Image: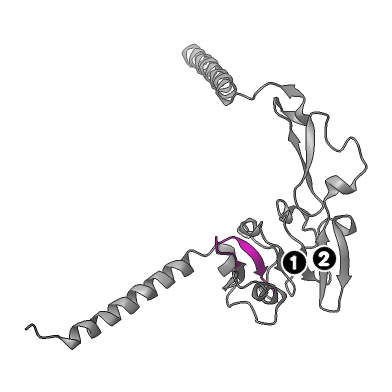
Amino acid sequence: MALRRPGRHASQVPWAAALLLALGVERALALPEICIQCPGSVRSSSEVALYCKETPALLLRARCCLNQKGAILGLDLQNCSLKDPGPNFAQAHTAIIIDLQANPLKDNLINTFRGFTQLQILVLPQDVSCPGDIDAWNNITSHTDNKICQGQRDLCNSTEDPELCPENGSCAPDGPGLIQCLCADGFHGYKCMRQGSFSPLVFFGILGSTTLSISILLWATQRRKAKAS
C-alpha cells in the first residue's frame, strides 16, 4: 500500500498563492493609465465610490469605477494637483460620472471632453466653468468647494438651427457643448458636399506621383546649377 505524503500537498499551497498573486498583479497592471495617474484610491465617501457601490457588478480599482468588461464608468481625480487632465484622459470617454474638484484646472475645458457623450455628472473646482456652459447641461450647481454639472444635453435635439449640419449630413453629439456632422452614405468631404466613395488609393496615388514629380524637377534644377558653376 502506497504511503500518503502529507507534506506534498502542503508544499503546493505557496505555489498556488504565488500564482493567484501574479494574476492579481497582472490585472492591476492592466488598468487604464488614467486610473493610476493619481496616487491612492477613491475615497469611500466620494460620489464616484457611491455610484460604483450602487451596482454590485461594478468594480472600484485605483481611481476608477469599471464594469465587467473593463470600461470606465466613473473616474475620481480630485485633489491630484492637475492643471489639465492629461493625454490619457480620453481613456475615460465612456464615463458617466467624473470628479475633478480640488485641482488647479484651466477654465476652458470644452475640447477636453470631446467624445464624452455618456457623461452625466461632472464635478469641477468652483472657479471652473462647465464645458459648454448652461447650454450643455440641464443643471449647474455652484457650492463653496466645487461646481456640479449635471444632465448632459443633446444639442442635436435642443437646437432649432436648420443649418446645423448640411443637407447630406446628420447631427450627432460629441460631448458637452459639442456636436459632429456625420455624412450620409455616398457623401464625404467638407460639409459632405462630395458624392461618391472616398478612395484612399487614388488620393495617395495622386499625392505620391505629385511629390515624385516635384522631387525630380528640383533634382534636375539643382543638377543644372551645379554644372553651370
Magenta residues, as a range? 66-78
Q: Quadrant of residue 179?
A: top right
Question: Label 2: which residue?
Answer: 149
Q: Earlier in the sequence, mark 2 or mark 1?
A: 1
Q: Quadrant of residue 46?
A: bottom right
Question: Label 1: which residue?
Answer: 105
Q: Is residue 26 magenta?
A: no
Does the image show residue 162?
yes
Instruction: Give the label on residue 11, or none.
Output: none
In the rendered view, tell whether residue 208 sits above or below residue 52: above
* Rendering coords of residue 28 (x, y %): 48, 69
In space, the residues marked 2 and 1 are separated at their CA atoms by 15 Å
Does the image show residue 128?
no
Check disc 2: other Cα within 10 Å, few if <14, some if 14-19, many if 20+: many
Q: Is residue 189 left or right of residue 149?
A: left
- In contact (CB < 8 Å): disc 2 and disc 1: no
Disc 2 element = strand
Q: Quadrant of residue 94?
A: bottom right
